[in-house]
Amino acid sequence: MRLNKSALLFAAVVAAAGLAGSPASASTSALDLPAGALTIVEVGTDAMGSDTWANRNREFVTFKVTGGAPVDVDGLVVQDNWSKNNTNPHTCNKYTVTGLPGQGSAAMLQPGETVTVFNGSRWGGNYKNGTEYRLYAKSDVDCGASGHFLNNDADSVWLTSGATQVASKSWDWNGGYTVN
Ligand SMILES: [Ca+2]
Ligand SMILES: [Ca+2]
Ligand SMILES: [Ca+2]
């Protein structure tokens, strides 16, 4: 096979473009939000009555943008204390944001909007309700108590971006179903 000079140049340009494309796609997962960029506004800690597979969506974490600028929450990890401090490879108690409903794989959260990560599942999956993105972690039945893993009496939830602890909320009580 013989190639003329322009064909070789073309091949070189294609190869260079391919190389240049790799770091760009990798950078989407290299997010590292500053501490305080998000605020946890509410945590559902205790489903009313017995903890069952059916009511595990009563455990949830809701957060919002702290400041006045949009925040890219793609790759954000939402987890409880056990998950954060345990090296067990079970992915229980841990949810990673990978896009928001209506945005494909992008996850830009605007000021005034909230994200709620529910422990359970929903027919139809993730969706946006008004200004709230509702995401479902689909916790395993063997995770905690029937898929409930936010301890009623004392626990913490953490929002982590890369190596940065963006936000956390802890409680040490047993006086209700949610913590604000
Ligand atoms: Ca609970
Ligand atoms: Ca309960
Ligand atoms: Ca827990």
Image: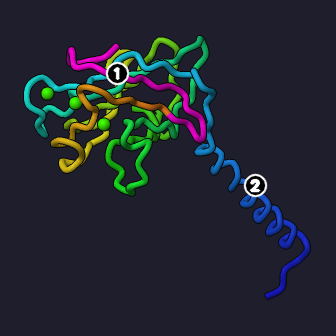
User: Does residue 164 sit above or below 39 in this rendering?
Assistant: below
> Which residue is pictured at 41% across the width and 49% down the height?
86
Q: Position of residue 166 (x, y in %)?
A: 55, 28
Residue 116's tag is: none
Q: Given the current orientation, which residue lies at the most extreme bottom position?
A: 1
Q: Is residue 138 left or right of residue 54?
A: right
Residue 173 in the image: above or below residue 117: above
Q: Quadrant of residue 59?
A: top left
**Percent x, y of residue 92:** 32, 47
Magenta stretch: includes residue 134: no
Q: Nearer the viewer, residue 77 or 123?
A: 77
Instruction: Rate crowding at label 2 as few (under 14), some (14 to 19) or many (20 or more) other CA atoms within 10 Å.
Output: few
Of helix, strand and loop, which one carries label 1? Answer: strand
Q: What residue is pinned by disc 2? A: 20
Identify residue type, mark 2. Ala
Front in this rendered view, residue 174 or 75: 174
Query: Which residue is drawn at the image coordinates 35% and 26% (left, top)?
Result: 61
Residue occupied by mark 1: 171
Characterize the magenta stretch by its predominant secondary structure.
strand
The C terminus, quarter of image: top left
Question: How busy is the neighbourhood of tag 1: few (under 14 within 10 Å), some, or many (20 plus)?
Answer: some
| Quarter residue 20 falls in | bottom right
Q: Is residue 124 visible?
A: no
Q: Secondary structure at mark 2?
A: helix
Tell me, yes or no, whether the two marked residues, 1 and 2, touch with CB atoms within 8 Å.
no
Residue type beneath disc 1: Trp
36 on left or right of 63: right
- Extent of the magenta region: 160-180
Q: Residue furthest left?
A: 49
- Whether residue 170 is in magenta: the answer is yes
